[in-house]
Amino acid sequence: MRSRLVLWTLAIVMMAPAIPAGSGHRNNDTWRLTPIDHAREPGSFSAGNAHTDLAFWGDLVFQGSYDGFRIVDVSVPAAPRVVSDVTCHGGQGDVAVWEGLLFRAVDRPQTGRGCDSADTPGSTPGFEGIQIFDISDPAAPRRIRSVPVDCGAHTITLVPKPGLDRVLLYVSSSFPGFFGRSPFGNECSADHGRIAIVSVPLAAPATAGVLRSFPIPGHHCHDIAVHLGVDRAAGACRPRVIVWDISKARQPRRLFSVRRPNVPGWHSASFTWDGRVILMGWEPGGGSEPECETDDPVGEHSVFFFRATDGRRLGRWVLPRTQSAEENCSIHNYNVMSVSGRYIGVAGNFQAGTSVFRFTDTRAAREIAYSDPPPLVPVQTGGAWSSYWYNGYVYESDITEGLNIYEFDRAPSDVLVTLEHLNPQTQERSL
């Protein structure tokens, strides 16, 4: 998602001490999702600090924003505690984590590589790419490297291949903030059409850099999901879904692509835990428009299911709760519970809140729990950017509120895997 609003023009790194979390959610309409607690931090696009995506390591939740990231201790989910709050300018701030490293995406041209940068004026070339932070001390993160990437980093997907002394990042750009070359070495052209691969040596992350890039048909992919258990990657690209073999992660090999009528471009991708089904969604209205009204086509608020081996369409889930003209809405970011024998998804849908849906029978998917907030006052872009299942709870990154934590009242008892960590776009094994 790209904000059309003016972001802050200056930010500096500020490390905050441990902060008690605020409690309580807005007066949500809920069914089978019980609010547990809330690590509150107001945000907005107009202020340039909207909250974005999440990653998880142990008992820590990492919440990105257009103005940095937060680290929240959820060892006691009913009492989340903010460990640190890092101010670092450059949207949109999606995050991924691996061991003692955090990676942050910058997709808005900046005047410098550091956290004290500002947006360049107009379409002036500037730094875009990946910021790398040492988070070995969660209370005191520090930036150790900024890697310029052509056309910027809108989303990032971690690829930690077993046995390697490094991790890879597949970097998806979005619509370019400038055409030409910046003083930092990154450049962008109208026919970019590539995915960059950033290589990060774990023993020397300060030497990270772009390893290579590989071509895609079309201008860009918005998001890429990987499943290392089946060595597949699925790209939510414009105008098609693209699936690659990533058994050689540095050299993805394209297998097939899929197009759907009336879907001009895809936004989000995920896999089921057995790697058999790909979930694909798109973002009509750019995430800022009310695309879940009664008279909107159901395809505008649907998740589509495709067979991972050949792209055959298997069905779809349609968000059943329509929204008002004052509520921006589309299905945005999601993942699938680690449950044997059934498929259960969790999705963040902006001002339609969070949905839990069952799609074991992909032809008869249905919602089985939700939390739906009232419209924001004053009217503005907000709601659930991302909602993910992680180790027994649902974590919701709310654009204007911060981090919401829910318990699913009808959670299945046969959850097989307690995860040590989770980057939601990356699945490291099969059930």
Image (cartoon, rainbow, N blue to C red):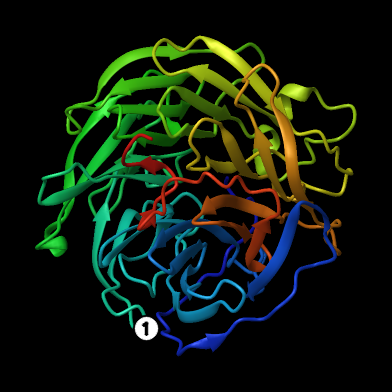
Residue sitting at x 56%, y 32%: 343
Give the residue type at disc 1: Ala
Q: Is residue 158 above or below residue 106?
A: above
Res 139 → quadrant: bottom left
Residue 45 shows in this picture: no
The quadrant in which the N terminus is found is: top right
- The quarter in which the C terminus is drawn is top left
Question: From the viewer's perspective, is residue 261 above or below residue 180?
Answer: above
Q: Residue furthest bottom?
A: 17
Query: What is the x, y in percent for residue 360?
Result: 60, 26
Q: Is residue 42 left or right of residue 31?
A: left
Image coordinates of residue 157 in percent, x first then y, are 36, 44
Q: Is 180 or 112 nearer to us in this picture?
A: 112
- Closer-to-camera residue (175/51): 51
Furthest-front residue in view?
413
Which residue is depicted at the point 42% across and 28% down? 235
Depicted 77 relative to depicted 224: above or below: below
Return the residue nearer the eye: 371 or 206.
371
Q: Residue 208, can we see it?
A: yes
Residue 111: quadrant of the picture: bottom left
Label 1 sits on residue: 139
Q: Position of residue 5 (x, y in %)?
A: 65, 56
Q: Foreground residue, 66 or 318?
A: 318
Image coordinates for residue 302, horizontal then vertical, percent: 69, 28
Label 1 crowd (10 A; few <14 / some 14-19 / many >=20):
some
